[in-house]
Amino acid sequence: MRNLLSRRLPVASALLFVSVLVVILGQRGSLDIVRNSLGTVMAPFQTWGAGIFYSLRGEDEDLTGNLEIDQKIADLEAEVERLRNENAELKEIQSKARILEEQLDYAIEYPDREVILADVIGRDPSPFLNFLIVNKGTNDGVQVGMTVVTSSGLVGVVLEAPTTYSKVLLITDPSMRVNVRLQDARADGLLIGQTGDVLRLQFIQQESEAGSGEIVVTSGLGANYPPGIPVGTVSSVRFRESDVFREAEVRPFTDFERLEVVQIIANFLPLDIKDIDQVNQLVDDLGS
């Protein structure tokens, strides 16, 4: 106990001395001098401290403002991405609607034709586009030899028909031969496939008045294709007096590079040569 009092006694004495000094100075008016002196001494430290405080406060405000701007930029970028995706989806829907509208127009124009709609799921990987793969096969009623068209015109013929898909040989293939007719001149010819922008049209009657811009359609001769299917337009005609026939170049209506959906005519099949022989025999029998 005595040790505790001995330790606290100096502290109490110092506090008592300071208190008495403050009272005396206050009575003599000297306390203001001390206060002013202390203020003068402490002013630079107060200014320095205040500067640090406000500087830190300003940095906090700038940091908060930058974070808000960054968040707004991120929100705007997300909105732009969302709108871009919506725009792409709307364009795809518009394209599908256009294709379906074309199919409807075709059905209205040719109500007697039964067609099977098929999506293009594959293309000729070679530089020369000569065939397509579509997603309909024998399970859907497709048979080899069926004619393939779009609302624009003739596409080709079914070359192979497994159960779930089919291979379509395009009229651009060099092996293709299509009997056609010039719609206005009423002249027949043989369309021969070739890669490129134009097809060859041969064996046009020399006396015909075929010219550029003439529309070419299937003639139905040979019974390989239904008659009246648009094929293309004549782009140029070659004619010499010494030639037996005229020749022409035909630009097809169908854009084979951009095909997405095709129509397979289901109620028409090429007439086999054996069937022709049977028909001729039947005619002979009826005549006799």
Image (cartoon, grey):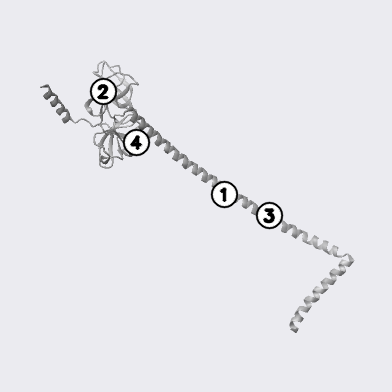
Local crowd size for mark 3, using a 10 Å CA cut-off: few (<14), some (14–19), many (≥20): few
273 and 269: which is toward the camera: 269
Q: Please report contact status of discs 3 and 1: CB closer than 8 Å, yes or no.
A: no
Local crowd size for mark 1, using a 10 Å CA cut-off: few (<14), some (14–19), many (≥20): few
Q: Which quadrant: the N terminus?
A: bottom right
Q: Which is more N-terminal, label 3 or label 4?
A: 3
Disc assigned to residue 71: 1
Q: Which is more N-terminal, label 2 or label 3?
A: 3
The residue to which callout 4 is attached is 261
Residue ranking furthest to the right: 28
Q: CA distance from mark 4 to mark 1?
A: 45 Å
The type of residue carrying mark 2 is Gly
Local crowd size for mark 2, using a 10 Å CA cut-off: few (<14), some (14–19), many (≥20): many
The residue to which callout 2 is attached is 189
Q: Nearer the viewer, mark 4 or mark 1?
A: 4
| Residue pictured at 74% horizontal, 81% vertical | 4
The answer to which image quadrant residue 5 occupies is bottom right
In the image, taking residue 38 as reference, residue 202 lies left or right, namely: left
177 and 106: which is toward the camera: 106
The type of residue carrying mark 4 is Val
The answer to which image quadrant residue 286 occupies is top left
The vertical placement of 165 against 214, above or below, is below
| Residue pictured at 62% horizontal, 52% vertical | 64
Q: Which is more N-terminal, label 1 or label 4?
A: 1
Q: CA distance from mark 2 to mark 1?
A: 70 Å
Q: Please report contact status of discs 2 and 1: CB closer than 8 Å, yes or no.
A: no
The type of residue carrying mark 3 is Ser
Q: Circle 2 sits in a helix, a strand or a loop, which is it?
A: strand
Q: CA distance from mark 4 to mark 3?
A: 68 Å
The residue to which callout 3 is attached is 55
